[in-house]
Image (cartoon, rainbow, N blue to C red):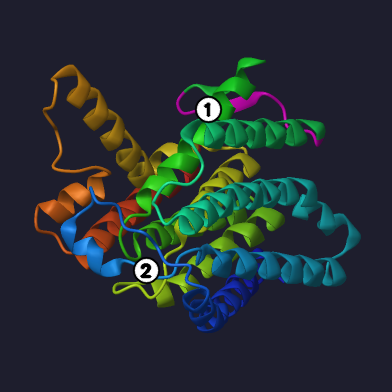
Amino acid sequence: MTTGIWSFEAALISFIVSSLIGSKLIPFLVKVKCGQTIKEIGPSWHKSKQNTPTMGGIMFIVGSLVAIAVTCLCYIMSAEDYMINKLKIAQVAAGFAMSLIYGAIGFIDDFISIKKKRNLGLTARQKLILQFTTAFAYLIVLRIFGDDTSTIIPFVGLVDLGFFYYIISAVVIVGIVNAVNLTDGIDGLNGSVTMFVASFFMVMAGVGSFVGMNIMCAAIAGGCLGFLIWNFNPAKIFMGDTGSLFLGGAVCAMAFGLDIPILLIPLGIIYLCEMFSVILQVTYFKLTHGKRIFKMTPIHHHFEMSGWNEIKIVIVFSSVTFLMGILTMVLFLFGVIQ
């Protein structure tokens, strides 16, 4: 069986499990009153979303976990011994474990928010300590299983960063995780963008015959699609920090697992725009004593305040991700990024 068949199996299992869990999870979360508290500073029309159940990320977390486990087991049972090495089980396990830990951090944050009936859970300092600890642990595990401190720089080639690799990589991981978290602000946005990001990573993993990463990427993409059945506007459930931090970890695991983290720049362009819109807004606000660049940040709220509806924002942001994915694939196939 080709990598395409295995990725299709993983995506299908993850999609089915994620979408089916939603039918049980949503009424349960409503029953135990796990509703989202909407920020006062957000768009006024978001108030209608108050008490929509959150922590829906559990759906694609379970879906992708089941899909990866089942598909990898099927592959091991059917493949020749020499082909099993293509799974790189250690790298996949480390990447998914990192994603789960970030999801657990998000779950704690969501739980505290719900319990205290406010939109704030863990403090920023607590989150950063936990996130950096997780990132460093993941990088150390990759090192133990053979990864080095080299990385690809387009038009330059392979560059060994030495000790600085760990510092730079940890900052990149934590930054991307929080950028993905910021992208979760309107119905269907984070799930749609991340589905395309995972899909393009899946294709590149398939081209490189990285079977394990191919399966993981497919599982994440399928899980996001299953979640979107319940999360697309008007959302019946939100992913919460449980889901968005998990997806942030998964996006990083895909990039570092394929050993091409530079791809986070083009493929994660929406995440980066969301993050830097906040940084620019806060910096400019402080320097000018109250002036703003955007009507509201993250930037998807700026477009909302400019009259765009949520569905239009999701379509445009997802289309940008898709087009950047095509560009990335061209660069990858022509050897600019390898």
- Residue 289 vs residue 37: left or right? left
Disc 1 crowd, CA 10 A, few/some/many (<14, 14-19, 20+) = some
Which is nearer the eye, 27 or 134? Answer: 27
Residue 254, placed above or below residue 15: above
Q: CA distance from mark 1 to mark 2?
A: 34 Å
- Residue 135 vs residue 318: left or right? right
**Image coordinates for residue 280, horizontal then vertical, percent:** 25, 29
Identify the residue at image location x=49%, y=37%: 123
Label 1 belongs to which residue? 171
Residue 190, placed above or below residue 168: below
Which is nearer the eye, 112 or 109? Answer: 112
Which is nearer the eye, 86 or 308? Answer: 308
Q: Quadrant of residue 64?
A: bottom right
Amino acid under label 1?
Val
User: Is residue 148 magenta-colored?
Assistant: yes
- Residue 298 vs residue 309: left or right? right
Asked if the residue under mark 2 is in contact with the one under mark 1, i.e. CB atoms within 8 Å, the reply is no
Please provide the residue range marked out in magenta: 145-155
Residue furthest toward the right?
81
Identify the residue at image location x=21%, y=21%: 286
Amino acid under label 2?
Asn
**Image coordinates for residue 94, horizontal then vertical, percent:** 73, 46
Q: Earlier in the sequence, mark 1 or mark 2?
A: 2
Identify the residue at image location x=48%, y=46%: 121
Label 2 belongs to which residue? 51
